[in-house]
Image (spheres, helix red, strand yellow):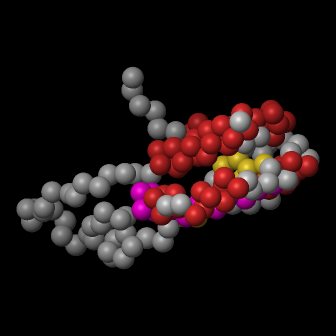
Amino acid sequence: MKKKKGWLSLLLAAVFLVSGCSQGNNESAAPSTGSGNEGTPSVTDNGSKDGSPLAPAKLKIVLYGDESNRMKELAKTEFYDVIKKEINAEVEFHFLPWTEYGGGKTDLMLSTGEDFATYTDANYMVKSVAKGLYADLTPMSVQQPI
């Protein structure tokens, strides 16, 4: 039961992380009064300048263990449709066997620059940081006054 709660917590955390990073501003801009720069194309609600829909982002989530029946059932639900509708993303779960936990697979994935959105490896994070596998994101963060 604890294992199921852990997977569910991890899944929910990943969904909240992804949804929190989306822009989520669906309000339209006020109509132009003609006093602005009319030659610059405006960005539409979906983020494109020409009005065509943006291709959905592909998010790969790396998890340890075998794909459970519960995860297979999740794939049959509207979970993927909701994610695509709300944040325009396609989620792919990639399962690594437990024999790879701490076996260097994630280190290899990080060092080769393999494209994935998130994974959990808290026990080995200190070693991974020491190897230089993580980038310092502090310069990219936006500091908000408190």
Residue 24 % position (x, y)? 37, 51
Q: Is residue 52 visible?
A: yes
Residue 55 higher or lower than 2, as above or below? below
Residue 21 % position (x, y)? 48, 48
Quick check: 66 left or right of 83? right
Quick check: 77 left or right of 146? right
Residue lying furthest left:
33
Where are the magenta residues, as a range? Answer: 84-96
User: Is 115 in front, or is 119?
Assistant: 119
Taken as a whole, is the magenta stretch helix, strand or loop?
Answer: strand
Quick check: 131 left or right of 143? right
Q: Please tell me which residue is depicted at 53% across the width and 60% down the height of the picture.
A: 77
Task: Identify the image quadrant of residue 2.
Answer: top right
79 inside magenta stretch: no
Q: Please tell me which residue is depicted at 18% across the width and 70% down the height of the picture.
A: 38
Q: Please tell me which residue is depicted at 13% across the width and 61% down the height of the picture.
A: 31
Residue 49 % position (x, y)? 34, 71
User: Is 60 in front, or is 39?
Assistant: 60
90 inside magenta stretch: yes
Residue 95 % position (x, y)? 76, 56
Q: How many marks?
A: 0
Q: Please tell me which residue is depicted at 71% across the width and 36% down the height of the picture.
A: 1
Quick check: 133 left or right of 140? right
User: Is 74 in front, or is 109?
Assistant: 74
Residue 129 higher or lower than 70, as above or below? above
Quarter that holds the C terminus: top left
Q: Is residue 137 visible?
A: no
